[in-house]
Image (cartoon, rainbow, N blue to C red):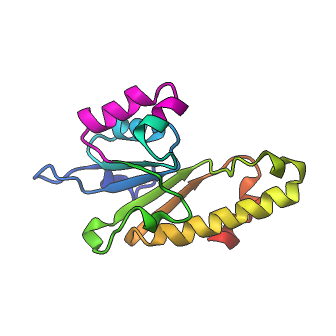
Amino acid sequence: MPSDTASIYHTNTEDKMLFKAITVGDGDLSFSLALKRAYPQISVAASTLLESRSELCRTYSNATVTSKELLEQWKERVIYGVDATKIEEKITAESEEQKFDIVLFNHPHLGDKALLESEKRHAERHYVLLSHYFYSAKSILKNGGRIHICLCGLQPQTWKIWNAA
């Protein structure tokens, strides 16, 4: 862990959350739960594109247990129907206090099998996805906050992540 971020994972003497994170596109909410378990002192809001808890639980077999733990044990927020390219439509953060220190999006994908026919088209569409995600994430990000994206293999190069940002 970089030394400049190590202090964000500790609470103050009043045991308040000093660090607010939101996950975007966390389909079954398992990453959000793992993050909360690993760092119980941070606030983790979880979001998914699915429209409701019942749809989430029908789609993912583990989501009933995962969402229940996030909501009941950890008292965290789960926000449904969040499009990573239009975050501000579901989450309003008008004051700095309502904003997040970090917005995380792991392994984004469009889920369009037709894109597999052309690597060039695939890369172009994901470049657009990332561009819109970066723009949208800024609307809920604190001053000095971070936007995180997790990609694999050659995706950063083929999707031109630096240009998208």
Residue under the image location 14 percent in, 49 percent down: 15
The residue depicted at 43 percent of the width and 35 percent of the height is 54
Viewer-closest of 3 and 37? 37
Q: Quick check: can you spot residue 70?
A: yes
Front residue of 31/14: it is 31
Q: Horizontally, is 114 left or right of 140 in the view?
A: right
Quarter of the view holding residue 85: bottom right
Q: Is residue 53 magenta?
A: no
Residue drawn at the location 29% of the way across and 44% of the way down: 76
Viewer can see residue 30: no
Magenta span: predominant SS is helix
Q: Residue at x 57, y 56 (%)?
A: 149
Instruction: Check if residue 61 falls in the magenta segment.
Output: yes
> Where residue 156 appears, x then y in whole percent?
71, 58
**Residue 142 horizontal/vertical position (percent):** 36, 70
> How many numbered circles does the render carry?
0
Asked where in the image residue 90 lies, by quadrant, the reply is bottom left
Q: Nearer the viewer, residue 120 or 63?
A: 63
Which image quarter is the C terminus in? bottom right
Residue at the left extreme?
A: 14
Residue stretch in magenta: 56-77
Q: Picture coordinates of residue 43 (x, y %)?
A: 29, 50
x, y percent for residue 96? 29, 73
Is 89 on the left or on the right of 36, as rendered? right
Q: Is residue 98 left or right of residue 116?
A: left
Task: Judge whether 49 appears above or below 94 on screen.
Answer: above
